[in-house]
Amino acid sequence: GNFAPPEGAVLVRSQNAPKSSAGSVFPAQVYPAHPHNFTPLRPVAPGFSAVDRAVREVALESRFDLLERATEPKFAGECPGTPRREFQDGIVAGIRVRPVQNPYVRLTAAQKYRLNNWPSRDWKGWIPQRAHVRGSRRKYRLPEDISPYKDELGEWHPPRVSGRYKADIEKQYYMHNLPWVWANNYYQGSVHYMDREPKGKTYWYKKEFRRAQVAEALKRADQMVDDYRKERREKKRLSWIESMVLEFAGEQTALPYIRQRRIPKM
């Protein structure tokens, strides 16, 4: 009842390791129980827990390989009694790291109508690349119909699917345990809020950084002073005698005896 898997435990799920009879040809995952349903991009860094890694992970495999890992949504009655444990898929160390369809719901009459009549809720025939939207019987191509397109005259047009119905397609992906692979930054990811530059007065955290810079520079202070003096000496203009010798003797003859002026590049 109250048993919880230990942190970092490997939970093998059917959507990550389907049966050979399913006919899927996507490559085997390096880490078959990853909560995001894809192979992680980088190894575990020291000092990082499983949940730290899960919330910062970036996909490595092709979008079309990931789309083969969809699972059909299932619905079950609500569990009797309280308290009730949350659905464990997509949870690492008690923290939810990705949206997951909750099967333990009490279906209302409106929800049953949608499941029975809307093509977008026909889970048996649902295809990630050819999705319906809520209340419509037209199929849309993904990602072509959710992106701006150019006509034969070279004019750009807005996406055929508006943001409202695009969000409904994204919800369908989550209900099939799929990440939203058509996001613009899907393979780049975003900066986790704990990794951002701290808020507050700038000098609160830049003062220590500046102090570390000064301490590092002091270790090579003697060499920096010598380089600076040499640079200033070479930058000085030629004296009157030096310029006269250079003018009458010529550059080739006076070169071994006259200081060569070097102006540092800015």
Image: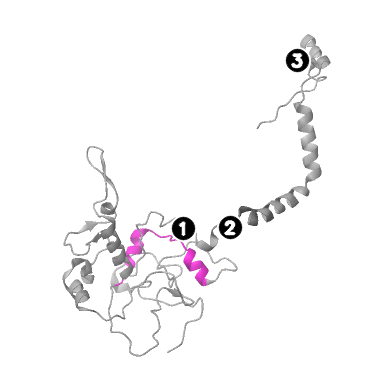
Callout 2 amino acid: Gly
Question: Going 64% across and 57% down the picture, which residue do you hit?
Answer: 204
Question: Going 51% across and 67% down the picture, which residue do you hit?
Answer: 53
State the separation of the CA atoms marked 2 and 1: 22 Å
Q: Which mark is residue 200?
A: 2
Name the secondary structure under disc 1.
Answer: loop
Q: Quadrant of residue 108?
A: bottom left
Query: Could you classify mark 3 by the number of other residues whose Cα lies within 10 Å: few (under 14), some (14-19), or many (20 or more)?
Result: few
- 24 and 97: which is toward the camera: 97
- 36 and 28: which is toward the camera: 36
Callout count: 3
Is residue 265 a member of the stretch shown in magenta? no
- 85 and 119: which is toward the camera: 85
Callout 1 amino acid: Ser
**Closer to the camera: disc 3 or disc 1?**
1
Image coords of residue 109 (percent x, y) = 19, 78
Image coords of residue 226 (percent x, y) = 80, 38
Q: Mark 3 or mark 1: which comes first in sequence?
A: 1
Callout 3 amino acid: Glu
Residue pointed to by mark 3: 251
Q: Tell which residue pokes out farthest to the front in this image.
A: 201
Q: Does the magenta stretch mainly form a helix, a strand or a loop?
A: helix
Q: How was this image coloured?
A: one colour
User: Is residue 6 toward the left or the right of residue 209 in the image?
Assistant: left
